[in-house]
Amino acid sequence: MPDSAPIPQIEQGLSRSLNPLEVMILEGAWGGVQYRKLARESGYGEEYLKQIGAKLWHEISDQLGIFVSKKKLRVVIQEWLYQVEATQGHLTDRTYGFPSGPLASNSKLYIHRPPAETIAFAEINQPGCLLCIHAPHRYGKTSMLRRLIAHAQTQAYRACLLDLQEADSRTLRRADLLLPWLCHRMAEALGLPPPEEPWDTRRGAKVNCGQYLQQVVLAQAETPLVLAFHALEVGLSHMAVAQDLLSMLRLWHEQTQGSPLWQRLRLVLVYATDSPTFFSDPQPQPLLSKIAPLNLGRSVGLPPLSADQFATLGRRYQLAPFHDANQESAVNGLHDLIAGHPYLAHLSCHVLKQGRHSLEEMMAMAVTPDSIFWPHLQDRLSRLQYYPQAKNALRRVVREEGVPVDGMSLHQLLNLGLVRVVDDLVYPLGHLYRHFFSTYLVEDGAVVDP
């Protein structure tokens, strides 16, 4: 869906043109701007703008047959646009394939999770920005990155995606191989001449890589460059490489603070917080405990889907229970079970669409080996084995109702996506995790065979 207010579609629905003041109010509401700020920037009185806005929301509600308010404008209009496109036959059953990977940048099944997208889209317009997007696996990071790059290209920005999953294991073990590899991938993506070989070994790989970025990539055009590192955690597998890579990225960001040329750079770092990757230390420690150097620039974490967002997803899958008021309690029960986990939400909707299980059957067998959630639960359990302190804390969390947890264990459990915090007390993220881990975690840490 568009990042700016869909003025033409709204005007078509109203059968009239909006005046400039109404357009300003609509755009402001779409972007979450308060009336006070609109009044200060436009010179109109705040109360006058509120009156015009109230009349506009009332008119839209009457003409479109949906209730619209300033607060809910964006989500309601997006859902209305989706329904219009669905009735016009733009969606096919291929839309509802198995959720095995990221969504296309224009997918109708993508659910906005404000304010994450708004922050990210605004940030890459800032000269020399550094944006970190992080969440556990299968939380929608890649889908969001695709939309971010598509948005950048609509702004006539250059965009280059460096996916560290493409690098082979030998390259990932040596900085003097990884950094030239990054430059070659930049050259291929942007249609630029590759770096000259061999590099001057006296300067080191970091300096050579930075000079290629400055003298060739940034100097190629005055337009901003969105340089995105996807799966950054893959490049942090070995301590020496991680130190060189992170210090180089930090240096690049610092260069943007004083150089107009470097300010063309917009760095985007995307990484999974639940990676089991280890540094090659004599006493290995999880990546999560050493990822602090990434806390630069603007950080955006992706949350689970809210109940309203989950309901919107179900309607986009055209599922009957999500359109039936009598099924609202069951739908909310499914959301509470999976706590809005994005992948599990799509998986649930896919299975319901295929007719393999009813909503009630899916919930009844949730933590059994026959459950559609079983592979995900086994994945969470295997990742938890890297964090014995957090595993001990999770035993208490799933067996009690709100417990305090020490800082490091809480940090790890949050990054694994297993818990939530309310008033300084820790709870399982959803009923699914509570039921599963209370059954399959025992006091000595062994896993109980199902």
Image (tube, helix red, strand yellow):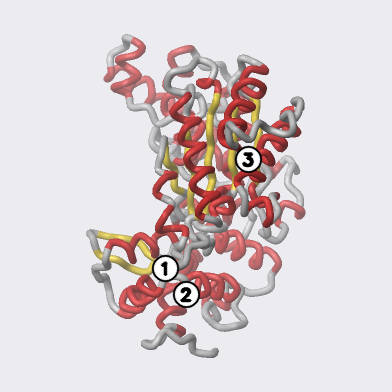
Which quadrant holds residue 238?
A: bottom right
Q: Amino acid at mark 3?
A: Leu
Q: Amino acid at mark 2?
A: Gln
**Residue at numbered disc 1:** 430
Which quadrant holds residue 147?
A: top right
Q: Amino acid at mark 1?
A: Gly
Which quadrant holds residue 418?
A: bottom left
Q: In the rendered image of this protein, does residue 384 appear above or below residue 140?
A: below
Query: Can residue 106 be seen from the camera position used here?
Result: no
Give how far apart the Cα atoms at labels 3 and 2 are: 32 Å
Q: Which element carries disc 2, helix, strand or loop?
A: loop
Quadrant holding the N terminus: top right
**Residue at numbered disc 2:** 385
Give how far apart the Cα atoms at labels 1 and 3 are: 41 Å
Name the outermost residue toward the bottom.
449
**Residue at numbered disc 3:** 179
Name the outermost residue toward the top.
43
In this rendered view, identify the residue nearer to me: 105 or 92: 105
Q: Residue at x 49, y 89 (%)?
A: 448
Q: Residue at x 48, y 63 (%)?
A: 281
